[in-house]
Image: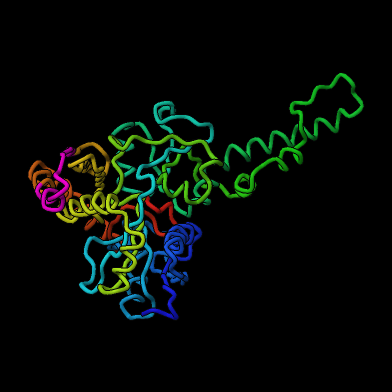
Amino acid sequence: MRTRGTLRLATRGSTLARRQAGIVTQALEDRRYEAELVTVETTGDQIRDELIHRLGKTGAFVRELDERVLEGDLDAAIHSMKDMPTEQPEQLVTAAIPERGPPGDALLTPDGSTLEELPAGATVGTSSLRRRAQLLSERPDLEVEPLRGNVDTRLEKLLAPALQDEHQKRTEADKERKGNAGDEDFEPAFDHTVDEWFDDLSELERQALGREVETEYDAIVLAQSGLERSGLARSVDYQELPTSTFVPAPGQGALAVTATDGETARDIQSAIDHPRSRVETTVERTILAELGGGCIAPVGIYAVVQGEYVHATVSVFDRDGEESVTGSRDLPVETHAEAAREFARDLADRGAAELIEGARRETDGDDADDGNDGDDGIISEEDKPEGK
């Protein structure tokens, strides 16, 4: 429904979700549409400290938003595409896919180290099954530990140990400085007092300083698009992980606007849809749907339009990154959906189906323990996008 000519758009309430929704509303306003954001709390927001791969099905951050659209309360909903199930209600369409942001993953460390420079046995934080498998495939020696929270929280957890250690050293140095106040030959360990040092910290660093540390991470992995859209990319050192080996989650970096099939959906599409991003994400999601492993297996799928073809890269792993089926193929743009299905069937025959079935059995085993299923991400305010 339209309300006084204004498009009412559903969004999650996290800071990142609202920033992403702001990208959509700004694009609509640039095309002279009026848009209003309406915050809807989702199951994913309510269950904050569980892994999505123990919730059950893809869509923990999606279903309630779409329900409000189907009920006619709101005109459309804004999603991080990688959160969306590959199957949608018949009445619902993806009205628009705005131009995609950075699709890849980023490795963040307190000191700017690369993945190759991390010490043996380093602890890396991620709650994504895909990222875990890819990390272990590249560096089997790493310890990959769960990482929960929104982007700010995850960065604080990464930065906290080093900042707290430095704070302790500076506090002790201040005491020593005061104890030697009359000694002209005394040389303090630091040029600035602990208070002066604290005043120079960013807000993120100040929050990290007060955070209780449960796990000391040497590095964490986030979706680059989420990092940039959160406004925190300049606050930390990070390395872009190559999409050739760290193949992103299907749809990572892309936003999607869903609406009921009709005039409103057509208006939104004509205003802000980005055809190239639509083709690329359609290929990725078609392959995912055909493989059938989206919520239970570590699957990376990345497509890029290159002239008359769409170059698609797929990697399917077991959960520990020890076995994999990978492949790339140039798919004709004109028949990209059918070509994507054929590519997926070939990958399944090469062993991808067996790996996904193995992941499904492991998920069933998890079910026996705690009654929950699998997905590639976390339940809480996300790095998502992306990031799964």
**Image quarter for residue 40?**
bottom left
Q: Is residue 352 left or right of residue 197?
A: left
Above or below, 284 relative to 117: below
Whether residue 305 is visible? yes
Q: Is residue 149 left or right of residue 279?
A: right
Quarter of the image with the N terminus in it: bottom left
| Residue 349: percent from left, percent from top | 7, 45
Q: Residue furthest top?
A: 185
| Residue 231: percent from left, percent from top | 53, 49
Q: Is residue 164 left or right of residue 199?
A: left
Does the magenta-highlighted stretch encompass residue 337?
Answer: yes
Q: Nearer the viewer, residue 360 or 290?
A: 290
Q: Nearer the viewer, residue 95 or 367?
A: 95
Above or below, 86 relative to 114: below
Q: Residue at x 34, y 66 (%)?
A: 268
**Image quarter for residue 94?**
bottom left
Does the magenta-highlighted stretch encompass residue 209?
Answer: no
Q: Nearer the viewer, residue 364 or 37?
A: 37
Region of the chain picked out in magenta, as a range: 325-342
| Residue 80: percent from left, percent from top | 36, 58
Above or below, 35 relative to 336: below
Q: Residue at x 33, y 43 (%)?
A: 131
Whether residue 360 is visible? no
For the rendered model, the colour scheme is rainbow
| Residue 155: percent from left, percent from top | 52, 46
Q: Residue furthest front?
A: 32
Q: How many marks?
A: 0
Q: Residue at x 60, y 47 (%)?
A: 204
